[in-house]
Image (cartoon, rainbow, N blue to C red):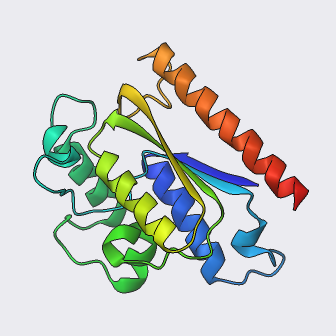
Amino acid sequence: LLVAGDSAGGNLALAACLKARDTEYEGFAEGVRGAAGMLLVYPCTSRQLITLPGGSYEQFANGYGLTRDQAAWMWRMYTGLDTTAELDTESARYAAPLDARSPLHLLPPTYVLLADKDILYDDGMQLVGRMRAAGVHCTVDEVRNTLHGSFSARSRDSHAWELYMLKAAAWALRATAVAAEN
């Protein structure tokens, strides 16, 4: 089993693995340990929409596909709250794991694939750092000169789409082969 998603789907994939880790489901005894890996493509994991000066939210706020204003609107649609409003702790740990400082231990091996010209770039790198610090085997890669949405928008940039697919497929094959050996 591979769990995967891009952008908000990356958020949902991460949330699903966190929830599986935190909950024992009848008939799903393996929990998150049953997953061979997690593929997160430019995952959206923070509602704060801020980075250090010169960071991705500032540098790519406008004119690079997904804008900061669009991201704020999407978070409002997802949570029902403005990005400055507090989420309750239980909701935040799954909806915005970077903001909630959710523990990221005991997750499956993860591949984070980023667009280098995306407001979510810094969030992705922060997630990778936190996962590695928690002991999760986490690989990060990027597709150069691409924007947010290139993974799922073949018609926008077929070359970038092919690069994403090749990288994702190669990782998925490795992850499932390793899982099959264990």
Residue located at (61% from left, 67% from top): 17
Q: Quadrant of residue 148?
A: top left
Residue located at (51% from left, 58% from top): 12
Q: Is residue 25 above or below residue 167?
A: below
Q: Which residue is outermost to the left?
A: 53
Residue located at (29% from left, 66% from top): 80
Q: Quadrant of residue 170?
A: top right
Q: Position of residue 21 (x, y in %)?
A: 64, 77
For residue 181, side relative to residue 124 (left or right): right
For residue 3, side relative to residue 14 (left or right): right
Q: Is residue 113 visible?
A: yes
Residue located at (43% from left, 51% from top): 43
Count of numbered marks: 0
Q: Quadrant of the N terminus?
A: bottom right
Q: Is residue 161 above or below residue 79?
A: above
For residue 22, side relative to residue 157 (left or right): right
Q: Is residue 145 above or below residue 13?
A: above
Q: Quadrant of the C terminus?
A: bottom right
Near-viewer residue (94 or 171): 171
Q: Is residue 155 visible?
A: no
Q: Position of residue 29 (x, y in %)?
A: 81, 79
Q: Is residue 89 above or below residue 95?
A: below
Q: Position of residue 161 (x, y in %)?
A: 51, 23
